[in-house]
Image (cartoon, grey):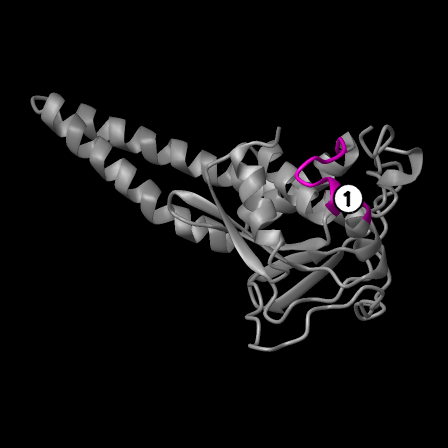
């Protein structure tokens, strides 16, 4: 049986429109599973946004023939779904991780971090009122820990970007300070990272429509000798969806 979040995801996808899927703070593997599920059923992931106490995953219908054929194969069995290959999960983990560890997401976290440090400092003043120097040292230690956390965040962001480039994704910068990685051959959303509003009476993408290529840019090559993740779109070559459809 599908869990509650997966059922909610299918309810959104049945409408055939772009949508935001809100989830509480989740493990990266769980977020990657939601992304992988949506892409099996005719949607494409277009970004993630960090809110104060939640995460928003952004999806839009994928008009490419491959996505539409895949959706036509799996929708009759929804909400049942095939097992997701580990390499696909890992790739989608990097995609979500990159979006959630960028500068924009970090800026949203800094006020929360500041409030936590301030509250901890005030609490230390109350409990260590007879020793202001010790309280200041405690607060300074928290600030240092926060700085280390920011550094680790930026390091994970950089590593995720390198992984996506090695997998054939295209770097896309719609505005200064906003960086995304697009799957090979996909078309950037305008603005990317936000679901497009659906015009009343507008036509939904039809099966068989080809998504235009993105810019014709050459794919960056990983450094010589570096371990290469599987190229995007090749994860299914070894039959990851065996024993499907269910009997």
Q: Which residue is located at x 61 percent, y 62 percent?
A: 17
User: Up-down: is 39 above or below 85?
Assistant: below
Q: Describe the element under mark 1 as helix, strand or loop.
A: helix
The residue range painted magenta reads 73-84
Quadrant hosting residue 183:
bottom right
Is 65 placed left or right of 12 in the picture? right
Spot occupied by residue 109 in the image (x, y as percentages of width and height) = 40, 46
Q: Which residue is located at x 84 percent, y 38 percent?
A: 228
Quadrant hosting residue 133:
top left
Residue 180 visible in the snapshot: yes
Q: Is residue 144 magenta?
A: no
Q: Is residue 82 magenta?
A: yes
Q: Which residue is located at x 76 percent, y 33 percent?
A: 82
Residue 128 visible in the snapshot: no
| Residue in the foreground of this view, choosing between 216 and 29 | 29
Count the marks: how many? Answer: 1
Q: Which residue is located at x 85 percent, y 65 percent?
A: 208
Spot occupied by residue 1 in the image (x, y as percentages of width and height) = 62, 28
Quick one: quadrant of the C terminus? top right
Identity of the residue furthest to the left in this view: 130
Spot occupied by residue 122 in the image (x, y as percentages of width and height) = 16, 33
| Residue in the foreground of this view, choosing between 93 and 71 | 71
How packed mark 1 is, by other alpha carbons closer than 10 Å (few <14, some 14-19, many 20 or more), is some
Is 50 placed left or right of 15 in the picture? left
Spot occupied by residue 44 in the image (x, y as percentages of width and height) = 69, 55
User: Up-down: is 7 above or below 104?
Assistant: above
| Residue in the foreground of this view, choosing between 73 and 105 | 73
Q: Which residue is mark 1?
A: 74
């Amino acid at each position: 049986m599908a869990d509650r979040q997966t059922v909610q995801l299918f309810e959104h996808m049945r409408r055939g429109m772009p949508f935001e899927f809100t989830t509480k703070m989740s493990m990266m593997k769980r977020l990657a599973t939601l992304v992988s599920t949506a892409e099996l059923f005719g949607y494409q992931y277009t970004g993630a946004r960090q809110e104060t106490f939640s995460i928003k995953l952004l999806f839009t219908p994928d008009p490419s023939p491959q996505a539409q054929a895949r959706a036509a194969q799996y929708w009759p069995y929804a909400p049942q779904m095939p097992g997701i290959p580990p390499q696909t999960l890992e790739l989608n983990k990097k995609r979500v991780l990159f979006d959630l560890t960028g500068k924009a997401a970090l800026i949203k976290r800094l006020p929360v971090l500041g409030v936590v440090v301030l509250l901890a400092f005030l609490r230390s003043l109350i409990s260590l009122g007879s020793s202001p120097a010790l309280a200041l040292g405690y607060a300074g230690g928290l600030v240092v820990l926060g700085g280390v956390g920011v550094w680790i965040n930026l390091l994970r962001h950089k590593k995720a970007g390198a992984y996506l480039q090695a997998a054939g994704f295209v770097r896309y910068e719609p505005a200064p300070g906003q960086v995304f990685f697009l799957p090979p051959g996909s078309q950037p959303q305008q603005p990317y990272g936000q679901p497009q509003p659906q015009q009343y009476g507008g036509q939904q993408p039809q099966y068989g429509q080809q998504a235009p290529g993105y810019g014709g840019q050459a794919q960056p090559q990983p450094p010589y000798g570096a371990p290469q993740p599987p190229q995007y779109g090749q994860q299914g070559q070894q039959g990851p969806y065996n024993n499907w459809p269910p009997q």
